Amino acid sequence: MDQLVENVGSDPGREQRVLTATGGSPWLLEVEDLHVHFVTTRGVVRAVEGISYTVRPGEIVALVGESGCGKSVSSLAIMRLLAKPAGRVVAGRILFEGRNLLELSDEQMREIRGRDIAMIFQEPMTSLNPVLTIGFQIMEPLLIHLGMDMKTARARAHELLKMVGIPDAERRLDQYPHQFSGGMRQRVMIAIGLACNPKLIIADEPTTALDVTIQAQILKLMQDLSRDLGIAMVVITHNLGIVARYADRVNVMYAAKMTEQATARELFAKPCHPYTAGLLRSVPRLDRARGVKLETIDGMPPNLLDPPEGCRFAPRCLAQVPESLCAQPPLVEVGPGHYSACVRAREMARVGPEGLGLARASAAVAVTKQVDRSEPIMSVRGLKTHFEVATGLKALSGGRGVVRAVDGISFDVYRGETLGLVGESGCGKTTVGRTLLRLDNPTEGQITFHGKDVTRASGEQLKQYRRQIQVIFQDPYSSLNPRMTIGEIIAEPMLVYKLQPDRKSAREKVTELLTQVGLFDYMAQRYPHELSGGQRQRVGIARALAMQPSFIVCDEPVSALDVSIQAQIINLLEDLQQKLGLTYLFIAHDLAVVRHISDRVIVMYLGRAMEIADRDALYETPLHPYTKALLDAVPIPDPLIEAQREYRVLGGEVPSPLNPPQGCVFHTRCPWASEECTKVVPELREIEPGHFAACIKV
Amino acid sequence: MLRYIIHRLLLMLPTLFGVAVLVFFLLRLAPGDPLAMMFEGANVSKEVIEGERARLGLDQPMIVQFGKWLVGIMHGDFGVSLWTGRPVLYEIGIRLQLSLQVAIMATILAVLIAVPLGTLSAIFKDSWIDHLVRIISIAGLAVPSFWLGMIIILLLLTYFSWIPPLTFTPFFEDPWKNMSQLIWPALAVGYRYSAVAMRMMRSSVLEVLQEDYVRTARAKGVYERLVVSRHAMRNALLPVVTVVGLEFAFLIGGLVVTEQVFNLNGIGKLFVQAVARGDYTMIQGLVLLVAVFFVMINFAIDMLYALLDPRIRYR
């Protein structure tokens, strides 16, 4: 800890200002050597082990790490909101304006929560009380902490709602959370956080559950508010792009320990811990040439019930030195305000990650895959999938709404290629996948597979079709039957379709498949809950491969996974494609991931294709304003680029597919929209060879 | 909203018709002839029995009987009891007040016991409070209410040398006397009934306390007691409402043994008598009545849901 205090930054004037503001200490928040344990039936989980970090008034500090690294737990510890009785702080100090929060009484702590320190949580959909009005939930801290009367509090709540950009605030105050979209709810959460003019806001993954355009809006809002109101912020995130765009200083955590601390610029320019370097490299980026393969960090984070001796990262580290040397590395200073917990940190600071052999050959630029475009394997024409919705009661009165989930989309997929399908939530991309799989029935249009019309296939024909087209689902946690072993899960489709004559040969095939997806054969006896998220997703892939399909619909296959694991799965999918000649429809919301894996990309919005093009054409010269906005919204994990970038935040939200806008569906949010756009439904036109866009202004 | 209510009320008709069909034909399919029961042991000639059968209309084809019964119901005439000769509605009416009152009182008692104890149990999970409440509720499930009823009477008798009045006094005639009679059966039944609701409330509160919005409330610095009462309990009540409501409907016709213990002349007792006597019209009337209650209470639960949870709005 000492070394941190020695180095208070290079701006003495600022330091002085800060000193007077906080009564002696330059820090608003000091976390010192914090240890948090969770007592479980299987033993003590050391969720946070000796982390220290500091926050100055008005500063945005990021806490970065993969799931389970202890970043959320440490922030809950600051609020003293750890789950009782399992979680407890066993050592350390948390000084807020010089007072140790851990020594306060429950009542004193309650007074601080919401008044001096506010918290914004990850899940806007569940973080607001469904039975209380939005207005009351914003007013509550005002009534409690500031002793306002109802009228004043309501006026202030109204003001707050306007401040966070919710139109029609007066009426909205009396509404309930379910009448708000996810992005709007997160704005409400911010309004609640701001209510009492706190000195510090802790935001735990505030935008993870939101779409990119909404994410950009919310982060912009938080950044502006922090700057204008001088509120310090601790942003907890796994997304390095967000860190690059918004944070002043960054703390990287790995397996309950602090691994690296630096200013954002310094960290991205000169990472001095192999883990940080690995994280930076395993994220597919929009600003870099596409590599042959994503670099990965092999293996998995350690189990915190029984963590390894010495450096936590050593087992996955490429720059690892003999174990005795890697024993419990302390945080050492490698530059002004830059600390790293690696025995080779100083060496790394000198020679860079490449010098330690951390760069891999895979950084080479990829050669574009040769795809035979003479005949499509699958061709889709004018596909529409509509759902009738009627809440039980409406059904009686005959009033039905139609959700136009997919509203007329046409494309071809060629053998051996990966067709990416991107769009924000609710754009219908998953429904396209499900309709191709015939899990949902198309309302209109035609699907041809290998020259055969399968739009209305049934019985034996459908069975034949389904054998050749398989799916990998998004959530590896809920898409595997928890009561079946991994072996049974993979063998089941083979036995149903009689691809294997008996159980014995099916078992052999399971072993083969497990090896193929990078798992071990003994895992066939395990149950899904015994596996990690990444391993489960591999099981999902093995199950799809069991049918020897030629076409796989990958529905957000990596979005539930951590960055380092995500890269492993993407690489696996690419390897399998090459080896088995598979064709993928890759559905995702992450534009960078789609860019990495796809040969061609479709951008969808409200059930329609906005743009279809070859990958490079789409990302380098996007034509459609929506594609441009999407690409703008994605933060790039490099603070220098981010600082120079001029991006426009796309306002508004995706309209309801129950009642899509007339004319061009995008006109309500489009920066180019004119009168004409509200009338004409733009056709998808071929603007350049192989590059289609649905916009009259292009 | 009004439209919705009308819809729901109209939807009840097919349900009730189904119940009517079932009870009517099942009764007649079941073995046992009401007339044979009526004249059991009496030395009467076959002609007399057949005459009586014709008088009651039981000699007609089943479908005709059914039709007549239905037409009667449409006019609010549920027929006369085969046994007493008085109108079914009259027989039910004089007992309904008592049964309904016991059911309502039992429900109120059950809620008063279950909601606070269940909540306490959840808040102080795994403490002695939780264990105590668990014992109370499991005892409630294990002890039959008639036994508890007898114990209550015995205790009142031994320690206070007092027993509740034996004849029913309507509430509006003498509320005090009425209550002093009915509070005991209501307690005996309500305690048992609270046991299920208590467990339900406990698990429901425990679940809600894990919700993100409860964490949000705490992060706002809301007082812990308000976190529980304002943020957690209203959400936790939803599943409990269902249990309580359905149990209430059951109480109307299901208090057979307790009524016996406390010597109450209620619907339960009438039910048993009617079945024992093969009193077709009475059984049909009672079953329809209970069905109406079930349907109505289900409807009331749905309305209550809408009141508790703004996400549910009926159109």
Image (cartoon, coloured by chain):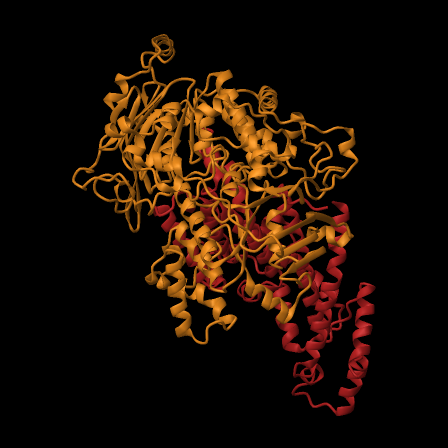
Chain colours: A orange, B red
Q: Measured along the vertical axis of the image, is residue A276 above or below residue A400? A: above
Q: Measured along the vertical axis of the image, is residue A682 above or below residue A338? A: below
Q: Please give the name of the residue rendered at 42% of the width and 43% of the height, measured from the top-left corner.
A: A294
Please provide percent x and percent y for residue A688: 66, 38
Q: Measured along the vertical axis of the image, is residue A348 above or below residue A40? A: above
Q: Residue furthest left?
A: A324
> Foreground residue, A555 or A51?
A555
The N terminus of chain A lies in which quarter of the figure? top left
In this rendering, does residue B90 appear at all?
no
> Foreground residue, A595 or A557?
A595
Q: How many marks?
A: 0
Q: Please give the name of the residue rendered at 26% of the width and 26% of the height, measured from the top-left corner.
A: A350
Please provide percent x and percent y for residue A597: 50, 45
Please provide percent x and percent y for residue B69: 79, 71
Residue B48, quarter of picture: bottom right
Q: Please give the name of the residue rendered at 28% of the width and 46% of the height, measured from the top-left corner.
A: A305
Please provide percent x and percent y for residue A494: 48, 69
> Foreground residue, A239 or B271?
A239
Q: Please give the name of the residue rendered at 75% of the width and 33% of the height, measured from the top-left corner.
A: A677
> Foreground residue, B210 or A618?
A618
